Amino acid sequence: MISWLKGEIVHNWQISNKKGVVLNVGGVGYEIQLLSKQIVKKEDSNSIELWIHEIDREDGTNLYGFIEVNQRDLFREIISVNGIGPQIGMALLEDFEVTQLVNSIEKKESNLLTKTQGIGKRIAERLIVELRNKLLRFIDNNETVYEDKKDIEPNQFSKYIDEIYLILNSLGYVDNEIKDSIKIITTNEKEHSLQMNSLSPEGKAELMDKHLKEILMKLSEKST
């Protein structure tokens, strides 16, 4: 697995909306796709260092390069989401800086994510459901990203359910589908209420992610 390369740019290439370079590393030319905003030809030198993500497929190997390691690592998180390919990951990192993208996901700002070409509402919501609460390492400790996170107070279990309902509705599921699948939680309302009251804010957020995944799995099984 190639993780990092340093070499001289010998060629810039473009295929459709994909852009990249051929990097000479010890006499071997590596074809690497880059973010367009990172393809800057230096006047004094063509030398460049890149953090690499390698994808091996039956039809060949593709390399994706990033100037900063946190861009590469965030790219890996994005494409780990089911149904999200590398070109969506590149498009998002083209339009957003790392901190901006993480904040958009953490704050559930799907309307911002959909401004990126190729990102529809369902994809945006899938990214939020799958990645929310998993990207804190990309945020400076001095920055606040949990402005929308509030403790689930006693006797406010219904608000918790309402938030899950809205997320599922934004994913395109209809009322009957949601009400049926959400019984996974509501049948054990008392148990879950007591559990949430004893959890930290981070633990409560993890519980919501767990419930959403269970519900989405149930909905997926019904659609097959």
Image (cartoon, rainbow, N blue to C red):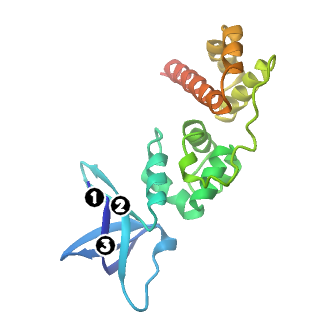
User: Depth check: 11 or 108 in front?
Assistant: 108
Q: How crowded is mark 1: few (under 14 residues within 10 Å), some or many (20 or more)?
A: few
Quote the CA–CA distance across marks 2 and 3. 10 Å
Mark drawn on residue 2: 1
66 on left or right of 6: right
- x and y percentages locating residue 119 in the rendered image: 58, 50
- x and y percentages locating residue 155 in the rendered image: 81, 16
**Kind of residue indicated by mark 2:** Ile
Q: What element carries label 1?
A: loop
75 on left or right of 101: left
Q: Residue at x 68, y 48 (%)?
A: 145
Q: Are marks 2 and 1 in contact (CB under 8 Å)?
A: yes
Q: According to the image, label 2 marks what residue?
A: 52
Quote the CA–CA distance across marks 1 and 3. 11 Å
Mark drawn on residue 6: 3
Image quadrant assignment for residue 154: top right
Q: Is mark 3 on a helix, strand or loop?
A: strand
Image quadrant assignment for residue 142: bottom right
Q: What element carries label 2?
A: strand
Quote the CA–CA distance across marks 2 and 1. 6 Å
